[in-house]
Image: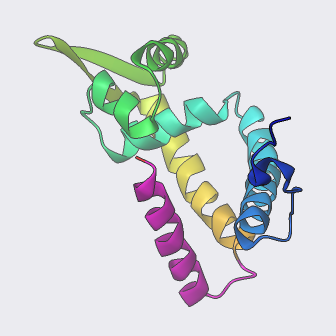
Amino acid sequence: MPQEPPSSHRRASTGRPAVLAWLRMVRFTQHVGKIWSGILRMHGLSPAQFNIIATVGGQPGLSQQELSQKLLVTQGNSSQLLLHLERRGLIERRAAGKEKLLSLTPSGQALFDDLVPAHEDWLVEQFAALNTQEQAELAVWLRRLERTHR
C-alpha cells in the first residue's frame, strides 16, 4: 500500500510565525475596515468608492485605465464605480483622445477635502499603539511582502 508524503500528515500549527503574523494582520485590517466602512456609509459611500475619490482627488487627470491599475481592480469594476459616482455628481470623465480623464467635481472635491484628512487622522489613531519608528518599519516590511507577490 503506497504511503502519502510525510508533509500531508503534518498537523496545522498556528504557532508558526508566518501564520500568526497573517492572522493578526487580517484581524486588524478586518476590524479597522469594518469601522471605516460604517463611517463611509454615513456619507453614502462604499470603501471602493472612497478609494476612487481619494485617488482621483490626489491625482487629478488620471485615465480610467490608470485608476484601475492603481486600485488593482478590473476596468469593468472601476467603470461601474465611476458611473455611480458620476451620477452622484462627484466625478467627471472627460474624453482625451481614446481615453477618459478623471477629475472631481466641486462636490467631489468638497467630499475629498472633508474625508481624506479625517481618514488620515483616524488611521493615525488606529496605529497609535506603535510609535512612529515602528509604524515606518511596519510599512517597510509590508511593502517588501507586497513586492514579492506582484
Image position of 71 with respect to 147: above or below: above
Query: Is residue 134 covered in magenta?
Result: yes
Question: Residue sitting at 64 percent across and 36 percent down?
Answer: 47
Please provide percent x and percent y for residue 150.
40, 46
Residue 146, horizontal then vertical, whole percent: 47, 56
Let me know if residue 67 is in the magenta part: no
Depth order, front residue of 18/109: 18
Q: Residue at x 75, y 47 (%)?
A: 5
Task: Looking at this view, name the residue that lies furthest to the front.
Answer: 1
Question: Which contiguous range is marked in magenta?
Answer: 128-149
| Of 43 and 78, the residue lying toward us | 78
Residue at 86% across, 51% down: 9
Total count of labels: 0
Residue 138 percent location from the top left of the image? 57, 75
Would you say residue 110 is visible in this rendering? Answer: no
Question: In the rendering, at what x and y percent does residue 37 appear?
Answer: 75, 40
Residue 43 quadrant: top right
Which quadrant is home to the N terminus? top right
> Which residue is pictured at 79% across the width and 59% down the height?
23
Q: State whether residue 99 appears in this view.
A: yes
Q: In this view, does 29 lie to the left or right of 113?
A: right
Left-right relation of 12 to 143 = right
- Magenta stretch secondary structure, dominant: helix
